[in-house]
Image: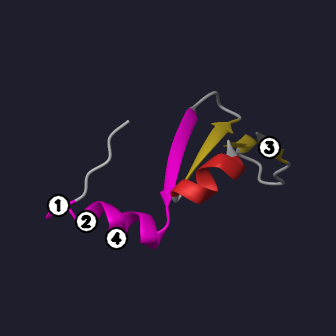
């Protein structure tokens, strides 16, 4: 895990989870905590990852 220092006035912290392990799989989880207490988790996908998912399906949906 890695935490980034952010100079933005609304963001309290950004945490990148399992950076090395997920890079090989084509995904990266990013957790953003705002100063007002809200928390958002993003999963970023590489184009190769999306292409692999679409190889066996007509559409691609990812839910949390």
Farthest-out residue, left = 58
Mark 3 or 4, which is nearer the eye?
4
Q: Which residue is mark 2?
A: 54
The percent position of residue 54, horizontal first and vertical second, equals 25, 65
Tell me if mark 1 has few (under 14), some (14-19) or many (20+) residues whose alpha carbon lies within 10 angstroms of its own: few
Q: Which residue is mark 4?
A: 51
**Front residue (pair 5, 37):** 5
Examine the rendered structure and indicate whether residue 51 appears above or below residue 17.
below
**Marks 3 and 4, how far apart in space?**
28 Å
Examine the rendered structure and indicate whether residue 19 appears above or below residue 49.
above
* Magenta segment: 39-59
Task: Tell me which label, 3 or 4, sits earlier in the chain.
Answer: 3
Cβ–Cβ under 8 Å for marks 1 and 2: yes
Task: Tell me which label, 4 or 1, sits earlier in the chain.
Answer: 4
Q: Is residue 12 left or right of residue 53?
A: right
**Marks 4 and 1, how far apart in space?**
10 Å
Q: Is residue 17 left or right of residue 42?
A: right
Label 3 SS: strand
Task: Tell me which label, 3 or 1, sits earlier in the chain.
Answer: 3
Label 1 SS: loop
**Marks 3 and 1, how far apart in space?**
34 Å
Q: Which residue is mark 3?
A: 2
Cβ–Cβ under 8 Å for marks 4 and 2: yes
Label 2 SS: helix
Q: Is residue 31 magenta?
A: no
Q: Which residue is mark 1?
A: 57
């Amino acid at each position: 895990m890695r935490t980034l220092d952010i100079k933005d006035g609304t963001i309290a912290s950004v945490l990148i989870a399992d950076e090395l392990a997920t890079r090989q799989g084509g995904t990266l989880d990013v957790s953003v905590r705002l100063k007002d207490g809200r928390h958002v988790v993003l999963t970023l996908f590489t184009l190769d990852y999306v292409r692999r998912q679409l190889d066996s399906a007509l559409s691609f949906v990812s839910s949390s």
